Amino acid sequence: MNFHIVTFGCQMNANDSDWLARALIERGFTPTGPEDADVVILNTCSVREKPELKVYSELGRIKRFLDERPGAFAAVGGCVAQQIGAGFFGRFPFVRLVFGTDGTAHAPRAIERLLQERDLRISLIDFTAAYPERDPALDTAPAPGAQAFVTIMQGCDNYCAYCIVPYTRGRQKSRAAAAVLAECRRLVELGARQITLLGQNVNSYGLDKHGDGTTFAELLRGVAAIDGLDRLRFTTSHPKDIADEVIAAFGELPTLCPHLHLPLQSGSDRILKAMGRRYDMARYLSIVERLRAARPDIALGTDLIVGFPGETDADFEQTLDAMRTVRFESSFSFRYSDRPGTRAARLPVKVPEEVAADRLLRLQALQDGFTSEALAHMVGRDIAVLVEGPSKKSAPNIHGRAAATGGATSWRGHDPYNHVVNVVCAASGDRTGTTVRAHVREAKKHSLLATER
C-alpha cells in the first residue's frame, strides 16, 4: 500500500508527519506521490485562517487522484481536524479518517483498518488525559538527517486571546523526561547531529500535573550531555515562563545554540494585556538583557501580530519602537485574523483590513533592514555549517567562481545562529550530516554565501 502526506503549519506538525511516515513504513507502506497513493494524509493547521482555507483547496485538488484509485481515501489530521471533526465526512465523502493531535498515535492502525473495511469511517478527536506516548518507529525507518526534532509536550494552558491552540491541541501535557531522553539518544545513535526540542510552550515543560518533576532547564542539561550531539535548540518559548536557569544555560552549555525565538506579539503594554500575554515590555526587555548578558552573541527572533482588535496607531508605533530596541534578526509577522472560539474573536473594535495590511508592510520593511544588518555582520567571519543537503544554488553561481571551484559542489545548512548558509565545498562526496568550517563571502537577503575553509 502507498501513502502520501501533505503538511501545513508549524514544526510540530512537520514532526508529527515525520512520525506518521515512519510508522506507516514500519507497517509495510510505501511513500509515493498523491497520484499513486492509497491514502493521502493532510496534517493541518488552524492557527490562522489562510492555512485552514488551504486544506479545503488541497482536498479539492487530490480528489481527482483518489477517484482514479478504487478504495483510495483521504485522512485529515491536526488542528483543523480537531476543530471540524466529523464535519469533513459530509463535505468531502472521500475523507474517511479524521484525527486530532492526540489521535495521531492511533492513526496508522486506523488507516490499516480503513483499507480493509471500505464502508467504515473513523473519527479520533478526543483529547487524552495524559501525553499520548507513541513508538518513535526509528529502528526500521530511514535514518534521520543532520537534524532531528523531538516533541516534549502537547497542548497549551495559556489561552492567549487570539490563539486557537488550546482548543485544537488541548491542555498542556508534558512528556516523561526518560522518554524524551531515550528518543534523543537513539536519534544521535542513528546519525542526528542536531536536536530541536518542540512544544507549544517549552518553558512551561514539567509545570503541569502530568510532569514527572523534571524542569525544562534540567531536561536541557540532560539532552545537552548526550555523547555525540553537536547542537541543541528549542522552540517555542513564552516569555512569561522562561526561567533564570534556562537563560543561564545559554552561557553554560556549549551544545546549546546561541539562537532563541522569543515571541513578542506586540510592543504595546495595552495590547499585550488585551492579548492575555501576562508580561509587559519591561519584563520582555529584562529577559532580552539577561539573555545577552549570558550569551552576548545570541541571535533573537520573534513573532508579531498587527491589527489586533483595538490596536491604534500609537500601539503599532510602540511595536516598531520595540523592534528598534531589540533589533530582532528575524521575525514571523502576520495580520490578525479571528479564530473561532477565541476571546479576541468577540472583541468589538476591529482594525480595517487596509490599515492592518499597511502596518504589516511597514513592520516587515523595518525587519528586512535588521535582518540585512545581521547577515552583513557575518561577512568575513569563519563559521561552522551543519549541512542538511544539497543547495539549490550550483557552485559556479555562487560568487561567479566557476574556474576557481572546478568540480566543487554547493551545500545548504545552518550556522549556530540559525542563519541559512549556502557553502561551496570541494568535490568529496555527500556532505549531508557533516559540519563544515566555512568562510562567509557574501550576505544575501535571507541567507549567507560561504566557501569551505
Image (tube, helix red, strand yellow):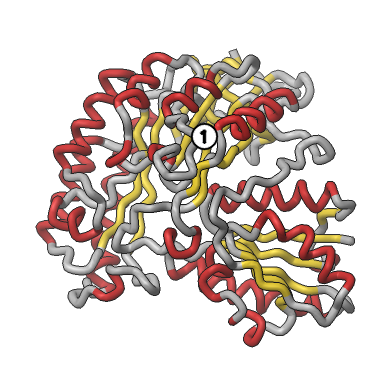
Snapshot quadrant of residue 8? bottom right
Q: Nearer the viewer, residue 57 or 199?
A: 199
Residue count near mark 1 (Cα–Cα under 10 Å), binned few <14, some 14–19, many ≥20: some
- Label 1: state its secondary structure: strand
| Quarter occupied by the N terminus | bottom right
Instruction: Measuring from the top left, give residue 69's x and y in whole percent.
Output: 87, 76
Instruction: Measuring from the top left, give residue 317's x and y in whole percent.
Output: 14, 53
Name the residue: 59% across, 81% down.
87
Q: Nearer the viewer, residue 265 or 126?
A: 126
Q: Is residue 348 left or right of residue 108?
A: left
Name the residue: 82% across, 54% down.
31
- One can see residue 397 in this view: no
- One can see residue 42 in this view: yes
Count every numbered label the image shows and give the total.
Answer: 1
Snapshot quadrant of residue 446? top left
Name the residue: 23% across, 35% down.
326
Name the residue: 22% across, 71% down.
351
Q: Which residue is mark 1?
A: 420
Q: Is residue 44 above or below residue 347?
A: above
Instruction: Measuring from the top left, give residue 238's x and y in whole percent.
Output: 34, 43
